[in-house]
Image (tube, grey):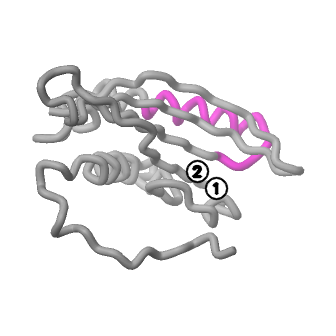
Amino acid sequence: METDIHYEFEIDEKVLPDYRVTNTVMNWLKGNLDSLVDNDNKKLFHKVNIGYNERSLKGFGNRPVCDVYLDNIDYRDDFDLNAPGTINTVIVITLKGNANNTYTKALDLTDYIIQEFIENKDWRELDLVVKETRINNTSIQINPNNKVWSTMILFELDHTLT
């Protein structure tokens, strides 16, 4: 079974600009995470994916990999019953390694991302699309996988739409 299927349909012209919400929010999150740099002004993440990239976990050196997912769309309880009101997304960051250093780096990275959401308005608001973003939940998990362990950071976000 082929795992990397490329779909050959285009509907860009069919979707009206007012309805381009999910892709817009996901690309905005990806761009925010792609822009993070370390103390040496090097990109923080080896790669930021929209959705899961099965090839990214095979080996990514000494930089974490980040995946951004759309989890759920909640709808408004007003006259626009079919209009989305909130989009729930998940950020998953994976750091490969089983040493204390890996977990400590995960803690530092968690603090850094929380700081960006608190201090950087561009991480909470997107003109004409997202009125407000709130971190709903954050967790850090240690995951054994054969002999190689990894530490995963999860952020659950709620984006209130305009």
Badge 1: residue crowd in 10 Å (few <14, some 14–19, many ≥20): few
The image shows residue 10 at horizontal and vertical percentages of: 28, 74
The residue range painted magenta reads 95-113
Secondary structure character of the magenta stretch overall: helix
Return the mark for residue 93: none
The residue sitting at the right extreme is: 147
- Mark 2 → mark 1, Cα distance in angstroms: 7 Å
Tell me which amino acid carries mark 1: Asn
User: Within the magenta stretch, is there residue 102?
Assistant: yes
User: Within the magenta stretch, is there residue 106?
Assistant: yes
Q: What residue is pinned by disc 1?
A: 62
**In the visual, does 96 lie left or right of 11?**
right
Instruction: Report whether residue 23 is seen.
Output: yes
SS type, badge 2: loop
Residue drawn 42% across the image and 27% down it: 114
**In the visual, does 118 lie left or right of 131?**
right
Total number of numbered discs in the rendering: 2
Tell me which amino acid carries mark 2: Pro
The image shows residue 85 at horizontal and vertical percentages of: 24, 30
Badge 2: residue crowd in 10 Å (few <14, some 14–19, many ≥20): many
Give whichever of 79, 158 is nearer the camera.
79
Q: What residue is pinned by disc 2?
A: 64
In this view, 58 is above or below 18: below
